[in-house]
Image: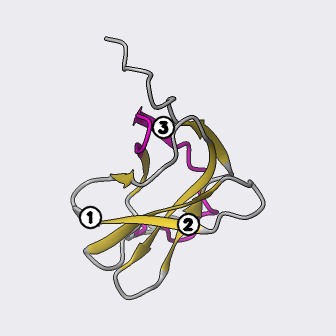
């Protein structure tokens, strides 16, 4: 009779380690005639505590020539990270295309980038419904 024991010590994977890129699903939290708030959630990307939430946007889906970004701090104890960006100086009644991603303070990119999405600002004389 053969008897054996196998002891395995598993180290928890760090965020972004050993996994393919996560598909991001950004949400437009609110939009007015000249600004929009865009939010998305990702698995905690790890790395530096300071990160930047980044939105690349423009009026042509093949030419996202403007950038809005917001600093945020990750909480290493949390498994998810919420990113939010305010996009300013938009034109009323205009369709914008955008993609989102995040980056570490040292310039390193996080593993997730969204596909291109679209939103339209309100007309200048349109008011928000309650």
Mark 1 closeness class: few <14, some 14–19, many ≥20 residues within 10 Å: some
Give 100 or 63, whichever is nearer the viewer: 63
The vertical placement of 69 against 30, above or below, is below
Q: How far apart are marks 2 and 3 (CA)?
A: 19 Å
Locate residue 110, reporting x and y percent. Answer: 49, 71
Q: In this view, does 39 lie above or below 20?
A: above
Magenta region's main secondary structure? loop
* Most foreground residue, 75 or 30: 30
Q: Is residue 26 left or right of residue 77?
A: right
The alpha-carbon separation of the residues under discs 1 and 2 comes to: 20 Å
Helix, strand or loop under label 1: strand
Q: How far apart in space, not on screen, are marks 3 and 1 (Cα)?
A: 18 Å
Q: Which of marks 3 and 1 is nearer the N terminus?
A: 3
- Which residue in the structure is indicated by mark 2? 66
Q: Quadrant of the N terminus?
A: bottom right
Asked if the residues shown at circle 2 and circle 3 are in contact, with their CB atoms under 8 angstroms apart, the answer is no
Q: Name the residue under label 1.
A: 72
What residue does disc 3 label?
27
- Please give left or right for residue 58 compared with residue 86 in the image: right
Can residue 126 be seen in this snapshot? Answer: yes
Which residue sits at x=68%, y=51%? 116
Horizontal side of 77 relative to 107 (left or right) equals left
Residue drawn at the location 42% of the way across and 54% of the way down: 89
- From which residue to which does the magenta span run? 12-38
Q: Are marks 1 and 2 in contact (CB under 8 Å)?
A: no
Quadrant housing residue 130: top left
Residue 1 in view, yes or no = no
């Amino acid at each position: 009779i053969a008897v054996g024991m196998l002891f395995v010590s598993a180290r928890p994977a760090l965020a972004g380690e050993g996994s393919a890129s996560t598909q991001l699903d950004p949400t437009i939290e609110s939009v007015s005639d000249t600004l929009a708030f865009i939010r998305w959630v990702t698995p905690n990307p790890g790395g530096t505590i300071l990160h930047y939430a980044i939105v690349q946007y423009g009026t042509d889906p093949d030419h996202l020539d403007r950038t809005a970004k917001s600093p945020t701090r990750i909480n290493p104890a949390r498994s998810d990270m919420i990113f939010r960006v305010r996009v300013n100086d938009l034109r009323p009644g205009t369709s914008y295309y955008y993609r989102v991603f995040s980056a570490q303070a040292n310039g390193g990119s996080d593993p997730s980038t969204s596909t291109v999405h679209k939103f339209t600002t309100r007309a200048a004389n349109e008011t928000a419904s309650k």
